[in-house]
Amino acid sequence: MTEAKLAIVALIDAKADKADEVKALLTSAQPLAVEEKGTLSWYAVQINATRFAIFDTFSDEDGLTAHLNGKIAAALLGKADELLASEPQIMTADILASKV
């Protein structure tokens, strides 16, 4: 198994009346994540009624960059004005330790 060295953590706040649509968009994005060769793991989670997060892992910068420029980001950012209460917080991180 390839070692995960980098991660993206994205915090997403849906408009109160659009949370179900954000949930559906994130759920439907899973097959797109599977298609990404450089994405080792991908999680979409719901934190509360309107807050969601995405956590992804990568072995290198190429995989991370491809994901940031990929179909999932385009789908989410393409509907940001309609669905989101604020701009997503997208942070990159170095993985210090993991258990998979």
Image (tube, rainbow, N blue to C red):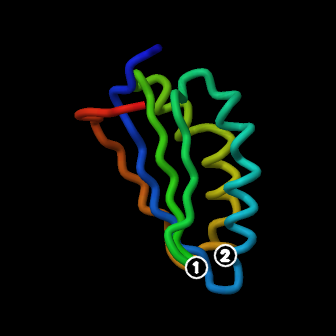
Residue 29 at what x, y percent from top left? Answer: 71, 47
Give the percent coordinates (x, y) of residue 81.
Answer: 64, 72
Considering depth in this image, is 61 or 19 the residue closer to the camera?
19
Please name which of the two marks, 2 or 1, marks the residue nearer to the observer.
Answer: 1
Q: Label 2 to label 1, Cα distance in Å?
A: 7 Å
Residue 59 on image: x %, y %:
41, 22
Query: In what element is the residue under mark 1?
Result: loop
Q: Which mark is residue 63?
A: none
Check disc 2 and give the amino acid type.
Ala
Q: Is residue 14 above or below residue 1?
A: below
Quadrant of the image for the C terminus?
A: top left
Disc 2 target residue = 19
Residue beneath the point at 55% across and 46% down:
43
Q: What amino acid type is highlighted by mark number 1? A: Ala
Marked residue nearer the N-terminal end (2 or 1): 2
Quarter where residue 57 is shown: top left
Residue furthest toward the left? 96
Task: Kindly check if marks 2 and 1 are in contact, taking CB atoms under 8 A apart as contact.
Answer: yes
- Few, some or many C-alpha atoms within 10 Å of disc 2 (few <14, some 14-19, many ≥20)? many
Q: Read off the residue under disc 1.
A: 49
Secondary structure at badge 2 equals helix
Q: Is residue 82 left or right of residue 50?
A: right
Q: Nearer the viewer, residue 19 or 62?
A: 19
Residue depicted at 69% across the width and 43% down the height: 30
Residue at image point 63% right, 38% down: 70
Q: How many numbered circles does the render carry?
A: 2
